[in-house]
Amino acid sequence: VITSIEVHLPSPSPRRYRVHIAAGMLDDIPRRVAAMFPARRIWLITDSTVLRLYGRKLHRSLVRAGMDTVVLEIPPGEASKHERVVRAIQTHMLEQGIDRDSVIVALGGGVVGDTAGFVAATLLRGIAYVQVPTTLLAQVDSSVGGKVGINHRLGKNLIGAFHHPAAVYIDTALLSTLPAAEFRNGMAEVIKIAAATDREFFRELERRNRRLTRTAPGMLTHLVARAVRLKAGIVGRDEREQALRKVLNLGHTIGHAVEAASGFGIQHGEAVSIGLVAESRIACAMGMLPPADLARLSRLLRSAGLPVQIPRKLDRKRFASALAVDKKSALGMARFVLLRRLGQCVVGVSVPTPFLAAFTGDEA
Ligand code: ADP
Ligand code: ZN
């Protein structure tokens, strides 16, 4: 059974594409890509780990489906979201004779999706690309929204574009080989979207909690589909970073600061988990959020194996300055997305400095 979710983007130029989700989806991709892009050259971009696990097989079956396919391999890891890697891919593609009809298939986690997507957005002012996200984080987070980009020495994701895929294929069976830490990272974003937008989904996560493992593809398909549908609903109404879309930043104001202050030693998902709890403590202290909801959020994150405390050894100076330069702050005042209750949040809340200090200080 394949779940298909339509992502509808009203602005700036109306667009729609589908996200197809199933355990075993990978086997169906060649047939679908061949039907969507007949007689077009495919550039399969992946990292070396994913190439070994799934890329070779996908390459073979694309060729068997009659597609002229070239494989481009990048090293795994965040360091690949770099100008140098983008340049190398572009040079290779231009030398090999790329044209406007070429199609990029990005097979991998967020790093591959962001880098290959950025190449697709910029080469010849934009060519088609198909996303096949293979980490839980990429499946729930970067498959909808169209953000692609790379890092700059002055910060993460500073060079980028909006470039929507022609289609997204999500195979939840691929998650069975994902390292446990990577799985937890993705769970942080799933819990975030439930807490921010859907109380019933949050309750469902609490109920299924213990059975949510990497090797339960049926349940994962259901979970990923629900998260993607929620995100598509938000992004569809508001493509550029405006009011509604800000709810997706829940936990990220403090989360990004924790991530940056750790020199990115703390993973994004872990930092978001810490941020969700710290920001919810602030919401409680301001009388916005019932303490029982904070306790439930913290319990669910902990049972997913995620940290909920700001580490004692975090560099406080770097943390404070990272909070101040966060792009969501206006006029130096910390602006937050805060929970009102599980499933509902308020955007653009100014948090008085004493609250911020009290809940992100050493006693946090
Ligand atoms: P993220 O989506 O969290 O940004 P990355 O693209 O950095 O993730 O991928 C995290 C790591 O997991 C990389 O080393 C990548 O090669 C590896 N990886 C991606 N997908 C899978 C998978 N399905 N099974 C095993 N390892 C994977
Ligand atoms: Zn995030």
Image (spheres, helix red, strand yellow):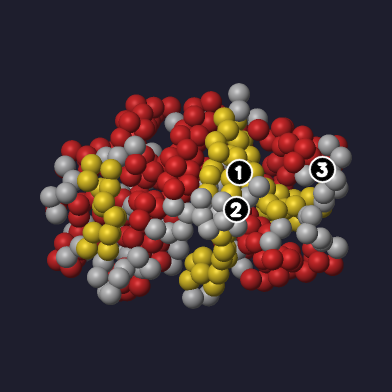
Q: Mark 1: few, some, or many residues within 10 Å (few <14, many ≥20)? A: some
Mark 3 CB in 8 Å range of ligand 1? no
Residue at image coords 58%, 49%: 15
Identify residue type, mark 1: Tyr
Query: Where does label 3 land, which residue?
Result: 38
User: Residue 66, image x and y in percent?
Assistant: 87, 40
Helix, strand or loop status at disc 1: strand
Helix, strand or loop status at disc 2: loop
Q: Is residue 176 above or below residue 109?
A: above
Residue at image coords 77%, 34%: 31
Helix, strand or loop status at disc 3: loop
Numbered badge on residue 164: 2
Identify residue type, mark 3: Pro
Numbered badge on residue 17: 1
- Label count reads 3
340 vs 161, left or right, is left
Residue at image coords 16%, 42%: 290
In terms of sequence position, does the residue under pointer 3 or pointer 2 come before the other?
Answer: 3
224 vs 202, left or right, is right
Residue 170 in sight in this render? no
Q: Mark 2: few, some, or many residues within 10 Å (few <14, many ≥20)? A: many
